[in-house]
């Protein structure tokens, strides 16, 4: 009799940043995705907070995501370089009811690109980033203020993989957006995995195990 599942389980630990101005709904998006809850009374994040989401991607693949909630007040400050370190992807969020938060999106992306990049083992270059047009439930015509063609052009010009209209309150498009981002991360990981020297793979697993240990020590 054959086992129902493969004997070797691949495990990944990915640090994903969630960026954007204060009040755009970053914490609400994380809480909805990780715990499937929503509240109107979240306090503004001070500094940085993070949550862990474990995803059974496939029978032989487990993904642990650290979602780092970066406070809007930290925008473009010196500490963001520390917060961004070792991130492999990002979500940039704006509030469709507040145009100024959209105007800040390009600055967040520029700051991100200047302070973090993919490791050489994953090809280098900018980390994959998705734009979230949040609070769609509050927008009168349920559009992000720009039509789809203009949004796609904006994403192309500023290096976003894609954009999604989201609502943490209605649980709209959040899981789809994160899944799309994870697909890109894993595709890149698999593309370059075969090119790595065995010593590089061992070093990467050491870093993953170390990060997991730090996470366990820091909880509770």
Image (spheres, rainbow, N blue to C red):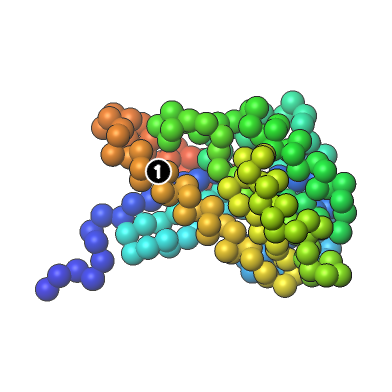
Residue drawn 42% across and 61% down?
Answer: 57
The furthest residue to the front: 149
> Crowdedness of circle 1 by 10 Å Cα count: few (<14), some, many (20+)?
some
Query: Looking at the image, which is closer to me, 92 or 2?
Result: 92
Residue drawn 57% across and 57% down?
Answer: 178
Please indicate, yes or no, whether residue 11 appears anywhere in the rendered image: yes
Percent across and percent down for residue 86 are 54, 34
Please indicate, yes or no, whether residue 50 appears anywhere in the rendered image: no
Percent across and percent down for residue 5 are 26, 66
Disc 1 is placed on an element classified as helix
Residue drawn 26% across and 32% down?
Answer: 198
Percent across and percent down for residue 23 are 83, 53
Percent across and percent down for residue 182 are 50, 53
Q: Image quadrant for the N terminus?
A: bottom left
Query: Looking at the image, which is closer to me, 151 or 177?
Result: 151
The quadrant holding residue 46 is top right
Q: Is residue 59 above or below residue 161?
A: below
Which residue has dot 1 on it? Answer: 189
The furthest residue to the left: 1
Left or right, 210 with respect to 154, comes to left
Residue drawn 87% across and 51% down?
Answer: 99
């Amino acid at each position: 009799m054959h086992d129902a599942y493969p004997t070797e389980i691949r495990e990944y630990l990915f640090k994903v940043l969630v960026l954007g101005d204060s009040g755009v709904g970053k914490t609400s998006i994380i809480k909805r995705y990780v715990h499937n809850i929503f509240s109107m009374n979240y306090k503004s994040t001070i500094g940085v907070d993070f949550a862990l989401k474990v995803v059974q991607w496939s029978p032989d693949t487990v993904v642990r995501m650290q979602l780092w909630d970066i406070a809007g007040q930290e925008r473009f400050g010196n500490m963001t370089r520390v917060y961004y370190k070792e991130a492999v992807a990002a979500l940039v969020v704006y509030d469709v009811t507040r145009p100024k938060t959209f105007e800040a999106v390009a600055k967040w992306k520029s700051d991100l690109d200047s302070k973090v990049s993919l490791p050489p083992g994953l090809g280098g270059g900018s980390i994959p980033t998705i734009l979230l047009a949040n609070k769609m439930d509050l927008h009168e015509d349920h559009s992000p203020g720009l039509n789809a063609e203009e949004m796609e052009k904006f994403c192309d010009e500023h290096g976003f993989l894609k954009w999604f209209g989201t609502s943490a309150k209605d649980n709209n498009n959040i899981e789809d957006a994160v899944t799309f981002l994870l697909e890109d991360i894993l595709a890149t990981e698999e593309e370059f995995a075969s090119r790595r020297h065995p010593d590089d793979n061992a070093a990467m697993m050491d870093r993953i195990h170390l990060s997991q240990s730090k996470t366990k020590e820091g909880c509770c």
